[in-house]
């Protein structure tokens, strides 16, 4: 596969970055994933951390060369992440289970397929336009669908951050799955948390991508989103990919064709290595290490 890829996460005006994100790929298949820990519930960053790690671990365990059934993989791995969050909360006698949104995409055989829970979004841009997007599991999206609100009204509605579907909730999440999308040269897939998409119109992003390279554009878009939100900026995170021309010589190419990857090897980039660094003022280093070990234990149990 030949592609250009970018990821980054900003803490914004918050004390803790509860977003987690990653991408992982071999020569034939790639996973992109973002989770946004829910700030209205205890330790949302733990739920996001567990979710991204679970999907990455499941992906590398199942994608020997490619995923046999991407749709089933997305559904099962997201449900496994939910169970791992609940197991972590139960083991640690937490009064409330941590919660998170999630959006993930799989690319293989020149096609993309994705799944989401909550209001972290995926956009697919083609030819300077928004080709398709996920539909938020939110109160304001329900009101848009019912004709009560316009998208412009929803953007400033007081309930715009209220979602009804998440990982870590009382009920297992309802995962919304896409159809397969055959990719064309120049297509861009962008996953982001609401701190990013809530400040920038999708058509504005599409027009910019038509004129500027992903790697130079997206950092500027993140800065613009943070500037527009001001001191109240939420965490904002993006994983974005542009599909490049594929040919026989580039079959084993990684980002922009600059890396050759053996068929049974994966390259991963994750922001989960921060491991709750932003919260060290309220919990000790020993507690952080204990939490990390327990997260890994929970993931292993539900991934078997």
Image: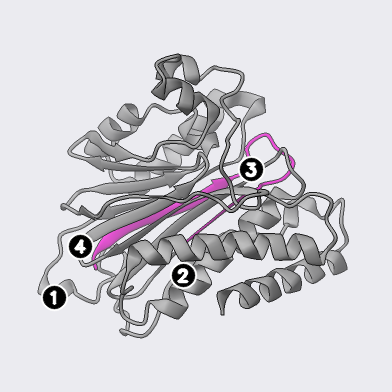
The residue lying furthest to the left in this view is 248
Question: How far apart are the two marked residues, 3 and 2, measured between alpha carbons?
Answer: 22 Å
The location of residue 104, given as percent across then percent down, is 43, 55
The location of residue 90, given as percent across then percent down, is 78, 63
Question: How far apart are the two marked residues, 2 and 4, measured between alpha carbons?
Answer: 20 Å
The residue to which callout 2 is attached is: 268
Name the quadrant containing residue 231: top right
The location of residue 300, given as percent across then percent down, is 62, 77
The residue to which callout 1 is attached is: 249
Label 2: element kind: strand
- Tell me which numbered mark, 2 or 4, is placed earlier along the sequence: 4
- Tell me which numbered mark, 3 or 4, is placed earlier along the sequence: 3
Of circles 1 and 4, which is in front?
A: 4
The location of residue 180, given as percent across then percent down, is 25, 55
Answer few, some or many: residues within 10 Å of disc 1's Cα (few below 14, many 20 plus, some between 14 and 19).
Answer: few
- Tell me which numbered mark, 1 or 2, is placed earlier along the sequence: 1
- Write the residue at 56% across / 67% down: 54
Answer few, some or many: residues within 10 Å of disc 3's Cα (few below 14, many 20 plus, some between 14 and 19).
Answer: some
Question: How far apart are the two marked residues, 1 and 3, measured between alpha carbons?
Answer: 40 Å
Against 201, residue 166 (above or below) is: below
Specify the segment rendered in magenta.
1-22
- Tell me which numbered mark, 1 or 3, is placed earlier along the sequence: 3
Answer few, some or many: residues within 10 Å of disc 4's Cα (few below 14, many 20 plus, some between 14 and 19).
Answer: some
On residue 110, the disc is: 4
Q: How many marks?
A: 4
Colour scheme of the rendered structure? one colour
For residue 62, say whether it is visible. Answer: yes
* Image-based side of 3 in relation to 286, left or right: left
On residue 11, the disc is: 3
On residue 222, the disc is: none
């Amino acid at each position: 596969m030949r592609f250009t890829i970018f990821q980054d996460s900003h803490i914004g005006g918050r004390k803790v970055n509860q977003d987690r994100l990653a991408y992982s790929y071999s020569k034939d298949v790639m996973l992109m994933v973002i989770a946004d820990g829910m700030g209205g519930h205890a330790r949302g960053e733990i739920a996001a951390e567990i979710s991204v790690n679970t999907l990455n671990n499941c992906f590398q365990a199942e994608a020997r060369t490619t995923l046999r059934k991407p749709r089933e993989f997305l559904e099962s791995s997201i449900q496994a992440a939910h169970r791992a969050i609940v197991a972590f909360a139960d083991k640690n006698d937490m009064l409330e289970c941590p919660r998170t949104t999630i959006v993930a995409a799989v690319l293989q055989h020149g096609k993309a397929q994705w799944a989401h829970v909550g209001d972290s979004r995926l956009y697919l841009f083609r030819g300077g336009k928004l080709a398709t997007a996920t539909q938020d599991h939110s109160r304001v999206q329900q009101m848009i669908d019912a004709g009560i609100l316009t998208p412009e009204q929803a953007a400033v509605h007081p309930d715009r951050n209220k979602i009804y579907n998440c990982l870590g909730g009382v009920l297992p999440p309802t995962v919304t799955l896409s159809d397969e999308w055959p990719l064309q040269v120049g297509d861009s897939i962008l996953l982001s948390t609401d701190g990013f998409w809530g400040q920038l119109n999708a058509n504005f992003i599409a027009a910019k991508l038509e004129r500027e390279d992903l790697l130079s554009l997206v950092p500027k878009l993140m800065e613009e989103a943070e500037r527009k939100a001001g001191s109240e900026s939420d965490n904002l995170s993006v994983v974005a990919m542009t599909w490049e021309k594929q040919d026989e010589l580039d079959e084993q190419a990684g980002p922009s064709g600059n890396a050759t990857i053996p068929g049974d090897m994966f390259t991963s980039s994750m922001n989960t290595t921060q491991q709750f660094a932003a919260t060290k003022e309220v919990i000790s280093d020993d507690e952080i290490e204990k939490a990390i070990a327990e997260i890994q234990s929970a993931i292993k149990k539900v991934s078997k």
